[in-house]
Amino acid sequence: MTTLSLDFGTRKEMVSLLQGAWRARAIHVAVELGIPDLLGERDQTVAELAETTGAHEPTLARLLRALASFGVFQRLDDGRTYASTPLSEVLQTKPGCAESADARFMAAPWHWAAWGQLLHSVRTGESAFEVANNGVSFWELTSSDPDAKERFNAAMSSVSEEESAEVARVYDFSRFPRIVDVAGGLGSLLGAILAAHPGVHGTLLERDEIIPLAERLLGAAGVAGRYELVAGDFFDKVPEQADLYLIKRALHDWDGDDIVRILSRIRDAMRPDSTLLVLEGVIDEDSDEEDLFRGLLLTVLCGGQDRTERDYRELIERAGLQVRRTIPVSGSLRILEATRA
Ligand SMILES: C[S@@+](CC[C@H](N)C(=O)[O-])C[C@H]1O[C@@H](n2cnc3c(N)ncnc32)[C@H](O)[C@@H]1O
């Protein structure tokens, strides 16, 4: 019989990693119950929290104690009162708190269920989402289900807002009187560009159901009369004749052939002197754990994937475009500036 030679510390570390999914799920449940917000108001006993949230008090007590064991909430000396900690504060639903929006997105049963089918993605390279959610795709669910739509859009916009200001800072958009943002989401990038450059007019192309949300954001951005919203499908047709086209974090959701189809539709819409900016996070040898797992998430949810800068260059070239230069934004986000070949 062989004896296990690994030391106790290594085995303990592995148990902790294996329990990582349980930790994450415990955080999701606390967020679903609104506990970070409740403890953000004041310290509360488990009985008070159970009463407000409608939870089963003894089980809630065990959940909170487990969470407090790694710093999400603090268990006070009486053993039944809990307080906020820095880690629970970032889960509060405050404007600009990207982690709380992310937590609500990850907490949704359809999201958690999709990760449960990761093996399917690894075996096939396909999305795990449909397998986990009765054949419904991520895009179908976030179109048809109001709660799924709200969670996805909140997670998307919290990331996008920070990034948009940074993109508007590093690239000179004033040279382009007419800009089309393809799959522009809720409009935060277009809003930041138009606010910084009064001479620019923008068009946002999005799925039908996103348009009212984009209208709300752009309507409040102080850029009235300088934008239009177009409901459409980027596989079908893209508004024509703009000076500059943008597509940010929308290609990574698709496989290579689909990306070439989307880029080809943009190319069809471009004039010979139009410019295209592809804005994507890229992976390289320095990519960290967070980037690498977000890459897997793309496959799990919608069959997309993270790519290197070179991969994006090749796909852009396959669509009859050529990359002129690459501009780093922040973190892994790059701007690949292209024109028609
Ligand atoms: C990850 S989000 C990025 C949104 C935005 N560009 C940003 O950076 O925040 C991908 C976007 O692609 C849009 N999208 C997906 N399928 C689309 C289609 N067929 N036509 C147009 N937009 C689509 C989604 O609605 C979503 O807003």
Image (spheres, rainbow, N blue to C red):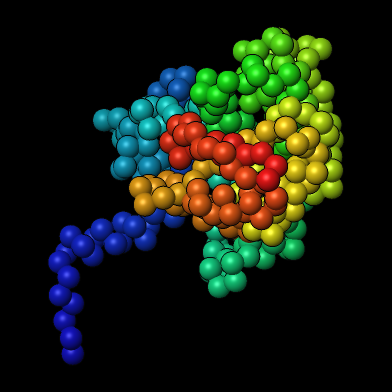
For this orientation, the residue located farthest to the bottom is: 1
* Residue found at x 74% / y 63%: 135
Residue 235, how many percent across, how many down?
Answer: 79, 49
Q: Considering depth in this image, is 29 or 192 the residue closer to the camera?
A: 192
- Residue 55 in view in this figure: no
The tally of labels here is 0
* Residue found at x 51% / y 52%: 310
Q: Considering depth in this image, is 202 or 104 the residue closer to the camera?
A: 202
Residue 322, how many percent across, how many down?
Answer: 62, 45
Relative height, residue 153 to residue 287 (above, below): above
Q: Considering depth in this image, is 239 or 107 the residue closer to the camera?
A: 239
From the viewer's perspective, tell me whether residue 277 is left or right of residue 200: left
Relative height, residue 248 to residue 319 (above, below): above
Residue 189, how many percent across, how many down?
Answer: 63, 26
In which quadrant is the N terminus drawn? bottom left
- Residue 177 in view in this figure: yes
Q: Considering depth in this image, is 57 or 138 the residue closer to the camera?
A: 138
Residue 25, how many percent across, how many down?
Answer: 48, 49
* Residue found at x 68% / y 45%: 341
* Residue found at x 15% / y 75%: 5
Occupied quadrant, residue 148: top right
